[in-house]
Amino acid sequence: MTAEYQVDGAVAVITLNNPPVNGLGLSTRRGIVDGLNKALADAAVKAVVITGAGKAFSGGADITEFGKEEAYREPHLISVIQQLDLSGKPTVAAIHTVCMGGGLELALGCNYRVAAPGTAVALPEVKLGLLPGAGGTQRLPRVLGVEAALNMIVSGEAVKSEMLAAIPGQTLFDKMASSAETLLAEAKAFALEVADRRPLPRVRDLPCKHPQGEAYFQFARTMVQGMSKNFPAPVRCVDAVQNATTKKFDDGMALERETFMQLMMTPESRSLRHLFMAERAASKIADVPSDTPVREIRTVGVIGAGTMGGGISMNFLNAGIPVTILETKQEALDRGVATIRKNYEAQVKKGKLKQEKYEERMALLSTTLSYGDLKNADLIIEAVFEELGVKEQVFKQLDEVAKPGAILASNTSTLDVDKIAAFTQRPQDVVGMHFFSPANVMKLLEVVRGKETAKDVLATVMKIAKKIKKTAVVSGVCDGFIGNRMIEQYSRQAGFLLDEGATPQQVDRAIEKFGFAMGPFRMGDLAGNDIGWAIRKRRAVEKPDMKYSGTADRLCELGRFGQKTGAGWYDYQAGKRDAIPSKLVEEMIEQYRKDKGITPRKISDEEIVQRLVFALVNEGAHILEDGIAGKSGDIDMVYLTGYGFPVWRGGPMHYAGEVGLFNVVQAMNRFARNPHDDAKFWQPAPLLAKLAAEGKQFS
Ligand code: T1G
């Protein structure tokens, strides 16, 4: 069992030992009960200390058990805590490092709690679309006070143990240890001190009141509802904590349990649990062992001080890593540095960045016009003009000057990383690092693995991505990698919907109601419609049979590139970003339909959403078949962190599973029969058809 028992004099010690964070899986739960029974049966034992081995007291329920039958096998965590409640000998939780979710609930079931400073304490269940399901909503308010407890439960955020110990009147911690190193000894000594104290103090016996109960909870409920309209769990947390102040303990517990089981079954919680696992799984690469040695990244070079180069540089400066930016002209360097300064100054003005932090970061930045100054850089990222010839110049120079073992990365979003690698004598050190604009804001980083890219290069880039707070997803080499390859099909469908009778605002409204941050036409106006225009021109040469609506080209021929030209799919007033439906664009679309002999029809929002989202799903399935993405969860992470897909729907591939792949395929068959659509595209990808036929999901 993954909980050890030993006796030290009159104190028994139960040590949770289920690496990496002592998740309360079945074997751990059994180990606790087993240890408790031994302690109760041993007359020499006067008190029991429970603590955690390694880097956590406990990270809570074992998320690797979610969805498995072990999670539902007795002893449930609630049953374990009931044994603590019924214990005839004092139990002391010795808490350190991480004490979260069920781990905190376990500690709350003990008679006493001794904490080391610096311990991250949280009830993060709400982030999984749940609420604490083992008494957290009933016990935490009893020891921390209703308002502090409710804040922790609704936010799910971690609070340091010493902050909680400072809350007036708190009885969460009976004693603060002087350090994590001395915690166990101090907890044992404390256990001996209280060994004979009776009655044993139980959190459940404490009163729980709020002086203006009704009014306070009404206010809390209104606030929480306003902030979490797409998530049911937060407001249920408010109900549960209110129950702690109005109902008997056992009744409050029963209601908490009932709510927990209900929330477990919600699509929102399934999405959040899926994304919690997908985010952690994304950093694992099937054929790159997690103990692959990584290269040290002490200094970074960035080629290009444009929008991307500047944004990329800020990521490393923010992580305290020195950056040297190289440009070909001094004024380009000056412009780039001025933009970085402006971005930081804006954050300082908003109070998001301290002045001294800003100065610290700028002190890490240097600039140069000479490649020779990059000779010591451990990682060099080029962010120059998106044209193969220009990339060739850059990588040939880098090959000359970069030190052996330096990682050479390209920020390309559409070019072939293998071709770029072939410009050097060291293709094994070349990788794609595709940042998304604005690079210092967007969390997504597509790590493009060339066929020669070395495994330790990948492991290094995945590690440095975590350090600069990016969600890194590995992509193989293909046109558009993962995100842009899928968004191209999504955009094609958006164009066909206009041909067939929808307006840009109807399409945007429908998909934004579904939950996207921004519809395809507002997105085009923001990013620039000329980007798609250039890609379609390339397509016309490379893939002449790839069908598009002609409306986007006509829009660009009118010079309506979007916000940057003051008009795009929508009209804009000077200096404003509000998208105003454009009569001129609607007439252009109507004329296009006439030219094509298309009689417009009324298109439902449901069809709009299905065609846009299932286009992502079908292309995503092809991407999985081609091995461009290793896991469907990776594709979901790309869409969540790079394209504004609604979190509560879990990403396109997860969402397809929620709809049912059978139903997705049926819808695609309907779309294939539409003469104005692209029947060839709507042939279900073989992987999708296979899974649908077997009644399975992508993950
Ligand atoms: N169970 C099992 N494994 C876990 C885990 C957990 N609860 N939490 C993290 N891991 C794994 C993670 O997958 C990774 O594995 C490794 O630990 C390091 O994680 C009844 C039902 C604890 C603060 O939501 O917030 O209790 O990749 O990279 O940055 O009310 O993980 O190494 O193989 O994040 O140091 C509530 C979620 C569950 C805590 C550590 N608990 N975890 O952060 O490392 S629901 C949570 C975290 C519950 C009860 C309900 C963080 C962390 P691998 P990491 P980290």
Image (cartoon, rainbow, N blue to C red):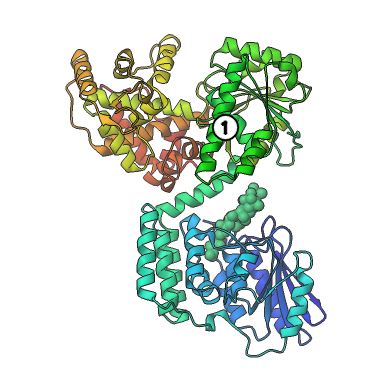
Instruction: Indicate the quadrant where residue 454 lies.
Output: top right
Q: In the rendered image, is residue 363 in sight?
A: yes
Looking at the image, in which quadrant does ligand 1 appear? Answer: bottom right
* Circle 1: element type: helix
Judge whether residue 69 can be spotted in this image. no
Q: Position of residue 308 (x, y in %)?
A: 55, 26
Nearer to me, 378 or 329:
329
In the rendered image, the vertical position of residue 4 relative to residue 555, given as above or below: below
Give the residue at the far right of this rendering: 9
Total number of numbered labels? 1
Residue under the image location 67 percent in, 16 percent down: 369
Taking the image as shown, residue 618 lies to the left or right of residue 46, namely left
Mark 1 crowdedness (10 Å alpha carbons): few <14, some 14-19, many ≥20: some
Q: On the image, which quarter does residue 494 sit in?
A: top left
Asked whether 682 or 242 is in front, the reply is: 242
From what the image shows, is residue 329 above or below residue 248?
above
Quadrant of the drawing holding the N terminus: bottom right
At which x and y percent is residue 151? 49, 64
Would you identify the image quadrant in which residue 298 lies? Answer: top right
